[in-house]
Image (spheres, rainbow, N blue to C red):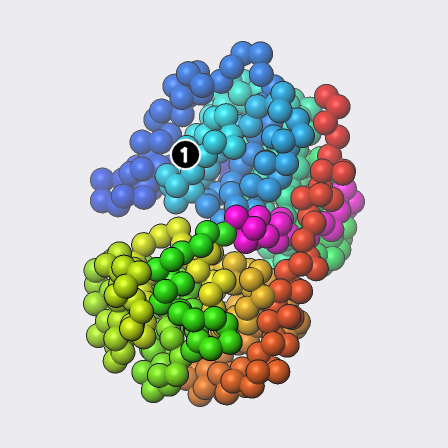
């Protein structure tokens, strides 16, 4: 089977790359100890519900559902697996799961061994996870299996003539909880009717994050004053050099705004690039005190874990990545009721498209576009309207977790 051949080749490539690259090396080491960790941590008399997330983003999508199940059905254990080191290394100590491990490469032997050890009573695969051997064996074992927050597009292999063989993997799911009507229609076109349009659980997650948001005294002192008498604040999150070239140029000239930059990469080289472009008094967060930020004009966030709370202090936000492989998480800014600006590579990001349509998001393709958006948002009425539309967009699409919980039966 071509799929098994492709998996075997991928496994070989990971092993070949491991001596030269940290990510495949971590993955390979994690795979070596999976079964030992399972033997150590699995409890014999516990029935496990298995969640699989490719990486950190998919984990965040699945997290509201995991936590809801844990709260309502505490007798079940939660088994969480990751494919990517960027998910596992960050969340390997997540206390919302009883066992957290890498998912072994999807060979028939690995799938059989993994399922024999874990014996899950239910499985949830988040968004784009379609591992053929695992899924076919789950079906053979009559394990209810669900695809959560999945989204389908016409160009995917399942809907092409040459993809019919691999497309049989979709028949292994008990039910699909998809993000939109197009996904339901595409699945229906190939004979799959066990589908509900429940939306994206990320909307539930960003509301959780907002409600748990931290107060940050350093940022508060940097912003200064009350909302009525302080300068406007522009916060750029997950920015890359092409993003920074645009907004730093603007704010070097418009000193009536304060600027917060939380770059996607916080290495020394990138920090030097940013500092070299800025012509304003700047403080790095790791060197800041509640005193020395008071007179600063720009604050650079050179550490992780703060961005989702920092957005609350903005008047206008910018989310980076849109001049590269794709924009980062616009919902973390919009949930605070903040207008969001982003670059042109956003067409495959449904939440960005929704924000644009709602009037809470603004696409730019150049410096001149950015200037035009900032001029528009300089009007208090337009700014307030875009705030309401951004926050309202997120609130209106929350509730996917609740809908999924209504449809999944926990009576096994």
Expressed as whole percent of the image width and height from the top left, the position of residue 218 reads 35, 60
Point out the stretch of residues depicted in magenta: 190-212
Most foreground residue, 237 or 183: 237
* Residue 247, quarter of picture: bottom left
Question: Which residue sits at x=76%, y=38%?
Answer: 406
Expressed as whole percent of the image width and height from the top left, the position of residue 397 reads 68, 57
Which quadrant: the C terminus? Answer: top right
Question: Which residue sits at x=23%, y=59%?
Answer: 287
Residue, disc 1: 92
Q: How many marks?
A: 1
Is 18 displayed left or right of 61 in the figure?
A: left
Provide the secondary structure element on which disc 1 rests: loop
Residue 286 is inside the magenta segment: no
Name the outermost residue toward the top: 44
Is 8 displayed left or right of 351 in the figure?
A: left
Q: Is residue 406 visible?
A: yes
- Determine crowd level at label 1: few under 14, some 14-19, many 20+ residues with C-alpha closer than 10 A: some
Residue 316 lies, with reference to residue 12, above or below; the image says below
Expressed as whole percent of the image width and height from the top left, the position of residue 327 reads 47, 64
Q: Is residue 246 visible?
A: no
Question: Which residue sits at x=54%, y=53%?
Answer: 210
Question: Which residue sits at x=65%, y=70%?
Answer: 389
Residue 206 is inside the magenta segment: yes
Expressed as whole percent of the image width and height from the top left, the position of residue 356 reads 61, 72
């Amino acid at each position: 089977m071509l799929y098994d051949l492709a998996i075997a080749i991928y496994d070989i490539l990971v092993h070949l790359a491991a001596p030269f690259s940290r990510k495949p090396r971590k993955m390979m080491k994690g795979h070596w100890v999976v079964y030992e960790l399972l033997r150590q941590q699995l409890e014999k008399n516990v029935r496990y519900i298995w969640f699989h997330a490719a990486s950190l983003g998919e984990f965040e999508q699945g997290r509201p559902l995991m936590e809801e199940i844990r709260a309502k059905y505490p007798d079940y254990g939660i088994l969480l697996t990751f494919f990517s080191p960027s998910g596992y290394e960050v969340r390997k100590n997540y206390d919302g799961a009883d066992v957290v491990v890498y998912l072994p490469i999807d060979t028939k032997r690995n799938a059989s061994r993994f399922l024999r050890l874990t014996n899950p009573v239910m499985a949830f695969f988040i968004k784009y996870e379609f591992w053929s051997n695992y899924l076919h064996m789950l079906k053979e074992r009559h394990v209810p299996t669900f695809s959560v927050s999945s989204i389908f597009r016409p160009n995917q292999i399942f809907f092409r003539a040459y993809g019919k063989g691999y497309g049989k993997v979709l028949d292994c799911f008990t039910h699909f909880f998809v993000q939109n009507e197009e996904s339901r229609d595409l699945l229906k076109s190939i004979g799959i009717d066990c589908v509900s349009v429940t939306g994206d659980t990320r909307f539930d997650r960003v509301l959780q994050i907002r409600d748990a948001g931290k107060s940050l005294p350093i940022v508060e002192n940097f912003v200064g004053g009350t909302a009525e008498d302080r300068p406007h604040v522009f916060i750029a999150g997950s920015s890359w050099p092409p993003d920074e070239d645009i907004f730093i140029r603007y704010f070097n000239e418009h000193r009536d705004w304060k600027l917060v930059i939380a770059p996607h990469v916080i290495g020394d080289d990138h920090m030097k690039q940013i500092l070299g472009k800025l012509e304003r008094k700047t403080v790095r967060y790791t060197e800041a005190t509640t005193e020395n930020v008071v007179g600063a004009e720009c604050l650079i966030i050179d550490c992780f874990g703060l961005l989702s709370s920092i957005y609350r202090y903005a008047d206008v936000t910018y989310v980076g990545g849109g001049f590269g492989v794709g924009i980062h998480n616009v919902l973390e800014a919009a949930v605070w009721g903040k207008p969001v600006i982003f670059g042109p590579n956003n067409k495959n990001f449904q939440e960005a498209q929704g924000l644009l349509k709602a009037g809470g998001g603004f696409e730019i393709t150049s410096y001149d576009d950015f200037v035009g958006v900032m001029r528009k948002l300089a009007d208090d009425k337009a700014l307030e309207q875009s705030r309401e539309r951004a926050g309202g967009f997120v609130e209106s699409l929350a509730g996917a977790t609740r809908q999924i919980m209504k449809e999944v039966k926990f009576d096994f």
